[in-house]
Image (cartoon, rainbow, N blue to C red):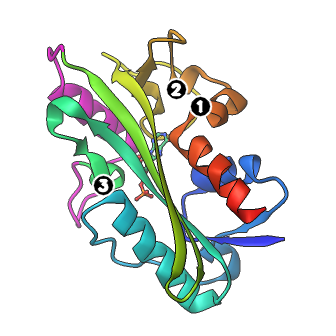
Amino acid sequence: MKIYLASSNIHKKKEISEILPEYTVLCPGDMNIEFNPEENGSSFTENALIKAKALWEIVNEPVLADDSGICVDALNGEPGIYSSRYGSTPAHKLSQEEQNCLLLEKMKGNPHRNCRFVCAMVLYLEKDRYYVIQETLEGTLAEKPIGKGGFGYDPLVFLPDLNKTVAQLTEEEKNNISHRGKALKILKKLLA
Ligand code: IMP
């Protein structure tokens, strides 16, 4: 069975495909659809809904959208919904490595390092008929990047209970506890 994913992020597609192996996950690029809706919502949920609705209006089939990011308490929740474009301008997009450096720099010497990944997942079924799930993964911001796995800010998020950063987890370990993994487990029940 096919499910359309309103995202061009290959890492998200991979994680979602691993957690929903019974579905073929199709991104706009897989269908030669140019997809760049303006994410001008003020929350993860609003942005996920904007993306889901925009793709649903094109494919007219059930659509999944994920809007996610990292929120650091000491920075009033920054980067938050701006995680993918943190520190970037329309003319210059920072690489993920540069974004990680920027975040570490802003938090240098700050002992209050609580942070969390947030994932808002929308399953858009029909016009005005949709489900929203929002989940988190709590951690503390590391002092430097550690680990090679995962993507994005994973090397910066330390999980005290496991004594590892998210980038040091196997794919399976991450999917079991992550913000996206938890949201998808609930979604799986809805889809069933
Ligand atoms: P979005 O595509 O607008 O939802 O942006 C998501 C951004 O948040 C990504 O580009 C990453 O920088 C970050 N992000 C979301 N989920 C994760 C994760 O699981 N690990 C690390 N970074 C993540």
Q: What residue type is labelled 2?
A: Val
Q: Which mark is residue 166?
A: 2
Residue at 59 percent of width and 31 percent of height: 177
Residue 34, visible in the rendered structure: no
* Disc 3 crowd, CA 10 A, few/some/many (<14, 14-19, 20+): many
Secondary element under disc 2, as helix, strand or loop, is helix
Residue at 43 percent of width and 19 percent of height: 158
* Disc 1 crowd, CA 10 A, few/some/many (<14, 14-19, 20+): some
Tell me whether circle 2 and circle 3 mark residues in contact (CB < 8 Å): no
Q: Which of marks 2 and 3 is nearer the N terminus?
A: 3
Q: Which of marks 1 and 2 is in front?
A: 1
User: Could you say where residue 93 lies in the image, as x and y percent from the top left?
Assistant: 30, 56
Q: Which of marks 1 and 2 is nearer the N terminus?
A: 2
Label 3: which residue?
Answer: 81
Q: Nearer the viewer, mark 1 or mark 3?
A: 1
Label 1 CB sits under 8 Å from any ligand 1 atom = no
